[in-house]
Image (tube, rainbow, N blue to C red):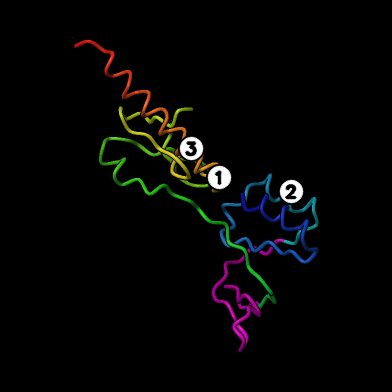
Amino acid sequence: MSAHQAMMFQQLSSKITFINHAPSELSEEGAALLADLGIPVVNHAIQDLEFGQSGQLKAAKLDNGERLQAQSLIVASRMNANADLYLSLGGELSEHPLGTFIKANETCATEVPGVYAVGNGSNLGAMVMAAAASGTLAGAAINADLLNSKLVKP
């Protein structure tokens, strides 16, 4: 996803350089995308950062000794659901290019009976409003399940 992020940042500035910190992880498709957009690629890991007296970034120092001037540095994050409780109940995490998440259906129910997952725990792309809405949806589904459980005859 880092090549995609570079593509988005290129809309904001013409001064983008892609530092390929882990060269084996950049796909051929990603490299081609960067080349098509004219974004230079540096295939070296960042070893250190250099800051000015006021605390602003001045440069990235690479593992080959090169010093690359920079005003900002964007790092692609990997999100992982905080799922210790879910895992202890027998659930399993699902993999996504952005990280790990708890797989849930449209009512937020998981594969573990009686357990629901909402927000970024089940949708890595959910922003604040979508995450909050999923909690409301799960609450309604839980309420329906509780009401329906009263109708089931033993």
User: Which residue is disc 2 drawn over?
Assistant: 33
Foreground mark, 3 or 2, reads 3
Residue furthest to the top: 153
**Local secondary structure at mark 3:** helix
Residue on which disc 3 sits: 134
Q: Is residue 26 above or below residue 89?
A: below
Picture layout, residue 43 above or below residue 103: below
Amino acid identity at mark 2: Leu
Cα–Cα gap, marks 2 and 1: 32 Å
- When asked about the image quadrant of residue 141, the answer is top left
Residue at left offset 30%, top offset 47%: 84
Q: Nearer the viewer, residue 114 or 146?
A: 146
Q: Nearer the viewer, mark 2 or mark 1?
A: 1
In the picture of the structure, the residue carrying the numbered disc 1 is 129
Q: Nearer the viewer, residue 49 or 150?
A: 150
Circles 3 and 1 in contact, beta carbons < 8 Å: no
> Over which residues does the magenta segment extend?
41-66
Mark 3 Cα shell of 10 Å, populated few (<14), some (14-19), many (≥20):
many
Q: Residue at x 43, y 34 (%)?
A: 103
49 in relation to 140, above or below: below
Residue 13 image label: none
Q: Can you say whether 88 is above or below 75 in the image?
A: above
Q: Is residue 117 magenta?
A: no
Looking at the picture, which amino acid does disc 3 mark? Answer: Ser
- Percent of width and height locating residue 140: 42, 29
Q: CA distance from mark 3 to mark 2?
A: 34 Å
Instruction: Pick whichever of labels 3 and 1 is earlier in the sequence.
Output: 1
Q: Is residue 105 left or right of residue 75?
A: left
Picture quarter containing residue 151?
A: top left
- Element type where label 1 sits in the image: helix
Residue drawn where x is 39% and y is 29% of the image: 109
Q: Residues within 10 Å of mark 1 (few under 14, many from 20)?
A: few
